[in-house]
Amino acid sequence: GSDLDLRVGELTVVRGPSGVGKSTLLRLLLGLERPDAGVVTLDGTDLAGLGRTALAALRRPIRVDIRSGRCRSTAVATR
């Protein structure tokens, strides 16, 4: 498995070559997709058990720059 710790107020840049999973990572972090295995938590909350309203509230402080409908090497996610 993998762990990713993002801190409030820090800027995190997700970049890499095409096909490595940048878009998938961001969609998982935003609760737009569910993992095939394991859990995705945000502020200690498992996203899988949340409804639309609760997910929207957790997403509110997150900013993502998506270019042309796809995440590119310059995509930025902050919280």
Image: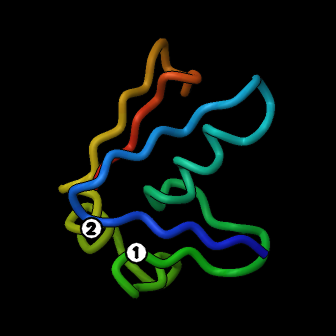
> At label 2, which amino acid type do we have?
Leu
User: Dot 2, crowdedness within 10 Å: few (<14), some or many (≥20)?
Assistant: some
Scheme of image coloration: rainbow
Residue assigned mark 2: 58
Figure check: 11 above or below 55: above
Residue assigned mark 1: 42
User: Dot 1, crowdedness within 10 Å: few (<14), some or many (≥20)?
Assistant: some
Circle 2/circle 1 CB separation < 8 Å = yes
The quarter of the picture where the N terminus appears is bottom right
For image coordinates 63% across by 80% down, the residue present is 39
The CA distance from mark 2 to mark 1 is: 8 Å
Which mark's residue is nearer the viewer, 2 or 1? Answer: 1
- The spot of residue 3 in percent (x, y) is 63, 73
Residue projecting furthest to the front: 10
Q: Is residue 15 left or right of residue 68?
A: right
For image coordinates 53% across by 47% down, the residue present is 26
- The spot of residue 71 in percent (x, y) is 54, 27
Q: How many marks?
A: 2
> At label 1, which amino acid type do we have?
Leu
